[in-house]
Image: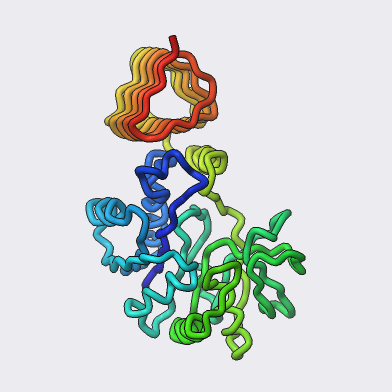
Amino acid sequence: MRAIIPVAGVGSRLRPHTYTVPKVLLNVAGKPIIGHILDKVIENGFTEATIIIGYLGDKIKEYVLKNYAIKVDFVEQEERLGLGHAIYLSRHTISRQPILIILGDTIFDVNLTSMMASEYTALGVKEVEDPRRFGVAETENGFIKRLVEKPETPASNLAVVGLYFIRQPQILIECLKELIKANTRTKGEFQLTDALHMMIERGEKMKTFAVDGWFDCGKPETLLSTNRHLLNTYRQPAPIESVVIRPPVFISPKAVVKNSIIGPFSTVAEGANVENSVVENSIISEDAMVVDALLRDSIVGSNAIVRGTFKRINIGDSSELQYS
């Protein structure tokens, strides 16, 4: 079975980190976002994947090929014209077998096997307070009767959260083709939601699948929240001399930590160096250095350097902050 993973976005809400690193390679709980996604699909029996790349796509390709043996086709989306457009570009990798589309900016804690056991197309949904930011599903008698992308006045609070199990992908491709040929856009883009609603209008039956464990990685605060959740599921690291570990934390075996207090809810990634510091509810990315610092609710980018007493920072890659 094949998973389709669109990751072409720029990730503007996560700047400055995404100036030099694509969003899906940002570290959360010791691993890039796309690493968590691929682990999940492989764990659930997928043997093939299509990854739709764009912004800094070569870095994504390099990471995946270096770390995963799953068969992967890479498709480039040069113009980011929407999720529907991204899926349509990958049509040559899609057969008549069912597919799972899984968005690349979220991490899911869900049993995909149960979702794929449905005899119908099934969309992952979650009840949210403000569904205007999402595609929204309206249901009747257990089936989806209508899908609307980011409605101004939602008739339902069931947000479609980025998991789509498609029983008949060729029908989806046909609907996407029609949208693109007619230049039918919603909010300036070719929307997957619109194509799915077109499938319903043509008689395709769709059900919803409740997704309680849905973790957004699209903003600094939600990235830290997702980091906290994942750390709760991790085995805690072995004791380190001169270091107080307040679990849950992730400390890479290839990180150097001295005379510090780490945690709770903190990640220290591979190659990072932390000395004489307190790090709480924070992510210290690959090869970063933190010295003589007090950090809370912070994200330190790869190769960045922080020296001195700060409380909360959001510093991008290869930057330096020094307090004197």
Q: Residue at x 53, y 58 (%)?
A: 110
Note whether 213 is above or below 270 in the view shown. Answer: below
Q: Nearer the viewer, residue 30 or 60?
A: 60
Q: Is residue 69 visible?
A: yes
Q: Horizontal and vertical percent for residue 264?
A: 51, 27
**What is the image's colouring?**
rainbow
Q: Quadrant of residue 79?
A: bottom left
Q: Is residue 249 visible?
A: no
Q: Residue at x 31, y 54 (%)?
A: 60
Note whether 44 is above or below 39 in the view shown. Answer: below
Q: Is residue 46 left or right of residue 161?
A: left
Note whether 60 is above or below 219 in the view shown. Answer: below
Note whether 26 is above or below 68 in the view shown. Answer: above
Q: In the picture, which quadrant includes the C terminus?
A: top left
Q: Horizontal and vertical percent for residue 285?
A: 37, 34
Q: In the picture, which quadrant includes the N terminus?
A: bottom left
Q: Residue at x 56, y 68 (%)?
A: 188
Q: Nearer the viewer, residue 95 or 196?
A: 196
| Numbered label tally | 0
Q: Is residue 148 left or right of residue 258?
A: right
Q: Residue furthest top?
A: 324
Q: Horizontal and vertical percent for residue 47?
A: 31, 68
Q: Is residue 135 left or right of residue 94?
A: right
Q: Horizontal and vertical percent for residue 185?
A: 56, 74
